[in-house]
Amino acid sequence: MWCGVVTLFPDMFRSAADAGVLGRAIAGGLVDLQLFNPREFAADRHRTVDDRPYGGGPGMVMMVEPLLAAIAAGRKAARRSGGEQIDAPRVIYLSPQGDPLTQARVETLADLPGLILVAGRYEGVDERVLESAIDEEVSIGDYVLSGGELPALVVLDAVSRLLPGALGNSASALEESHLDGLLDYPHYTRPEIGRSGNTESVVPPVLLSGDHEAIRLWRRRQALLRTWLRRPDMLVGREWSEEDRRLMEEVLNASSH
Ligand code: ADE
């Protein structure tokens, strides 16, 4: 996937691009990450990228011209990178006013050949940039950060780990998609008996049984129970499979005894 990022702080991406799954995806050529700094497209010798808001009020607003020029440079670079058809990369502006980022949206983005993430700073960007150059506005949650860089990195991380070959163990992504809309089940590794806080704790025996079907059912029950206890909102409107319905009933009966 070709991914351009428009940002006044390219260093924030350079360090993240070295580490973990995203780092490996870039090193392995799965993600072609390119950075475009609006400051380099500013017209004056002070390289001004922001100005006071019309109508008054606190803070500064990112100006139209440097941002549009940086986005246009991104589009051009995407086209030049050729290969796949990246003629029209999806341009996404990160902001608390955007549509919520969900795993479903991440999956849609991961299918695109090209993406340009626009990170704002200050109080926001001139509305005319949104009207003329942004396809989609995305929020990573109902809180306000000081810029779009961390949200852009969140999108990049969530998307890149879905690209075929990005995860060392490709079964992880596959298995996770089976958890469709549920929270994850608990995980354990050695030692079999360990300390969790002050209490001696043991690994659930079923995980040591070698009975793959019993393990699968236990994990599914755990995922259902956790979701029911911690995020009941995720179960509203769910299409229940026969098996999930049965397992959920078992779990609720067991916990009410
Ligand atoms: N920029 C500032 N806060 C943000 C948020 N919550 N999501 C996306 N972009 C942002």
Image: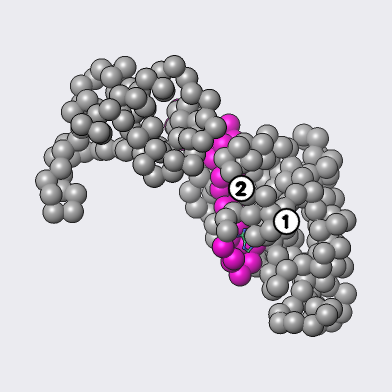
Residue occupying image coordinates x 36% and y 41%: 229
> What SS does tag 1 mark?
strand
> Which residue is most to the front?
256
What are the residue bounds of the magenta stretch? 143-171
- Reply above or below: 256 against 56: above
Q: Determine which of the numbered discs, if any, sits on residue 239 in the image.
A: none
Residue occupying image coordinates x 67% and y 50%: 99
Q: Amino acid at mark 1?
A: Tyr
Foreground pick, 157 / 28: 157
Q: Residues within 10 Å of mark 2 (few under 14, many from 20)?
A: some
Question: Can residue 201 be seen from the camera position used here?
Answer: yes
Foreground pick, 83 / 72: 72
Q: CA distance from mark 2 to mark 1?
A: 12 Å
Residue occupying image coordinates x 72% and y 46%: 115
Mark 2, residue position: 101
Picture coordinates of residue 1 (x, y %)? 68, 40
- Reply above or below: 165 against 46: above
- 68 on left or right of 197: right
- 145 on left or right of 49: left
Foreground pick, 257 / 4: 257
- 105 on left or right of 166: right
Residue occupying image coordinates x 52% and y 30%: 238
Ligand 1 image-quadrant field: bottom right
Q: Quadrant of residue 217?
A: top left
Q: Nearer the viewer, mark 2 or mark 1?
A: 2
Picture coordinates of residue 23 (x, y %)? 54, 49
Mark toward the start of the polypeptide (2 vs 1): 1
Mark 1, residue position: 93
- 2 on left or right of 182: right
Picture coordinates of residue 101 (x, y %)? 61, 47
Look at the image and tell me in which quarter the C terminus lies: top left
